[in-house]
Amino acid sequence: MITQAPDGDQPLDLHNALRVVKSAEETARRELRGNEALLYLVWGLSWLLGFGTLHGSRFGWLPLDYEPALAIFGVFLLIAIVITIVATGRYSRGIRGHSAFLGAMYGVAWALGFLVMGTLSGIIANVVDDFWVRGMLINGIAILIVGLLYITGGTTFNDKTQSLMGVWFLVINMVALLSGSEHYLTVFFIFGSGGFLAGALVETLRRRQQRQLTHA
């Protein structure tokens, strides 16, 4: 004998259930890392202006010696770091449990990775005299860390865009190193900043599509 379900009971809508799950995942990801599109844009502009300044100094289309150019590059990176810390700190405030642990360990990995890079940079500076070769080696270490942590972050937070950007940075890092000290700045000036800007565009379109699905 088949008993009919009460009128108030509705059959399970798998599409709506999937939409709810994806919406919750998006919310959790935003809370852990903030607005990815904004952060990618900030870093894209930082790299574009920073590597552009070094490139202009290297090839003479900017009236700057390499030391002031390097200082300007450092200022752009510092601005991007401060914006990233403020943005992610605001979004992650109040998060507890396993999500907080993931976010904290991811942050620790970035901090420790660049502390190691700083140590290696000091050693390289003592044994390599040529400024541009020294810069290429130090930059290669930094981008190695960035690429690996982007891949790790993407897999941890289920973010395909971030993982693909990590792969992209590792590929252009290898290309830049193989191109030598004369051309590695050109590679990062064009393709490094371009990777961040492309990521910002992809994330903007994805967030817009997500909002449309949520309100559908």
Image: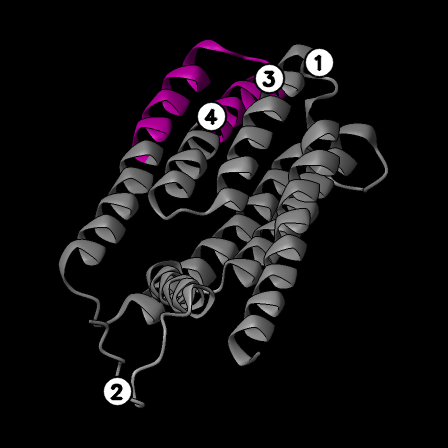
Measure how far apart labels 3 and 4 are at the Cα level. 9 Å
The location of residue 80, given as percent across then percent down, is 51, 55
Q: Main secondary structure of the magenta part?
A: helix
Instruction: Return the residue at label 2.
Output: 6
Where is 214 relative to 69, above or below? below
Residue for point 81% across, 42% down: 62
Mark in front: 2 vs 1: 2
The amino acid marked with disc number 4 is: Leu
Residue for point 60% across, 16% down: 133
Magenta stretch contains residue 155: no
The disc label shown at residue 144, or none: 4
Query: Decide: marks 3, 4 in contact (CB < 8 A)?
Result: no
Other residues around mark 1 within 10 Å, as few (<14) / some (14–19) / many (≥20): some
Coloration mode: one colour
| Residue toward you, 57 or 155 | 155
SS for callout 1: helix
Residues shaded magenta: 115-144
Instruction: Return the residue at label 3.
Output: 174
Other residues around mark 3 within 10 Å, as few (<14) / some (14–19) / many (≥20): some
Where is 122 relative to 35, above or below? above
The amino acid marked with disc number 3 is: Met
SS for callout 4: helix
Judged from this view, the residue extending furthest toward the front is 1
Where is 80 relative to 209, above or below? above
The disc label shown at residue 148, or none: none
Query: Decide: marks 1, 3 in contact (CB < 8 A)?
Result: no
Instruction: Return the residue at label 1.
Output: 179
Residue for point 36% across, 70% down: 12
Measure how far apart labels 1 and 3 are at the Cα level. 9 Å
Which one is earlier in the sequence, the residue at label 2 or at label 3? 2
Mark in front: 1 vs 3: 3
| Residue toward you, 9 or 15 | 9
